Amino acid sequence: MATQFVPAAVRSALEILATERERTLTERDAFEAFRTHVTTIEPPEHRTSSAHGRQSAAQRTLVKQSHSDDRLRRVQDAYRESVMSMSHYEDEYDDSLAESLAEEFGPEVAGAVLTGDQFTRSLREQLLTASREACTRRTTFLTVLTRETESLQTAEETITALGSALETLDARSLESWSPVELADSYEQLLTAEDRCEELVSERQTTLHSHGLPGPMPIDSDLDLTEYLYQSLSVTHPVLADLADLADTLRGERQRVERAMQACETHLSHYSSP
């Protein structure tokens, strides 16, 4: 049976990226839906009519609070029905309404929405601006995810192709190989090892120069690779698979080298007078 190398870490990382992309799309659409809903909520006009002028100050306050509270409740309901209703919300965030609003819009805006007594034009503009920025962050992050996905797909293909150097080392004992076969296999394995080193250097350059470029969708102390791959046992899946492949290639090359030495000894023994 031929030996086959599987870039397991990269494949797991690609699954994570696919899930992250789907969730990011959902979040962008949720914030856009929230923003659209907020645009339909009109702040009070603050115009004084003759009838309003005959009301007492207490009556005017009650009327204002009744209308304002209704508008603020509509904002809260819109947020629950859009952002907090996402299928992955509980697993990914599990924040309360207050926590989520503060995380996305800041504590001041969250406080105005939850405990304020008036839905002002200023508050609406703050909500519209912040929700638009939330959409923009996620749109930008989608570009990052696409770029990283393409990079890992290329890495998977390249690593798999390099691993094909192992497929010549089948179940047939190396003792039965000819010197030419052993030499060819040795060179193939050595070339694959060298290419692994080149790819490690290229990936490290990419990580150092870019740090996987792009803003995080949420505030985090983690860098982007740590954020994306924190559920894996490694934070650099390409480097991890390349290291595993290089170790495997090196071990097989050394095995072939021993077989070559044994073959030379055997030939030398029979060619001696």
Image (cartoon, rainbow, N blue to C red):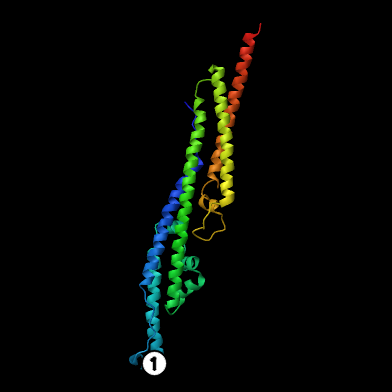
The answer to which of 170 and 155 lies nearer the viewer is 155
Q: Quadrant of the C terminus?
A: top right
Please, what is the three-letter code of the amino acid marked with disc 1?
Ser
- Please state the horizontal and vertical placement of residue 141, each as a whole percent of the image: 47, 56
- Please state the horizontal and vertical placement of residue 36, each as a whole percent of the image: 37, 67
Instruction: Name the side, left or right, on which 196 lies relative to 153.
Output: right
- Quick check: 171 above or below 35? above
The answer to which of 260 and 112 lies nearer the viewer is 260
Please indicate, yes or no, whether residue 15 appears anywhere in the rendered image. Answer: yes
Q: Residue at x 63, y 15 (%)?
A: 265
- Please state the horizontal and vertical placement of residue 184, each as a whole percent of the image: 55, 23
Q: Residue at x 52, y 29 (%)?
A: 166
Please indicate, yes or no, whether residue 83 appears anywhere in the rendered image. Answer: no
The answer to which of 146 and 242 lies nearer the viewer is 146
Q: Residue at x 51, y 33 (%)?
A: 163
**Residue pushed farthest right?**
273
The answer to which of 151 and 229 lies nearer the viewer is 151
- Dot 1 lies on which element? loop
- Quick check: 197 above or below 36? above
Label tally: 1
Q: Which residue is mark 1?
A: 56
- Quick check: 25 above or below 271? below
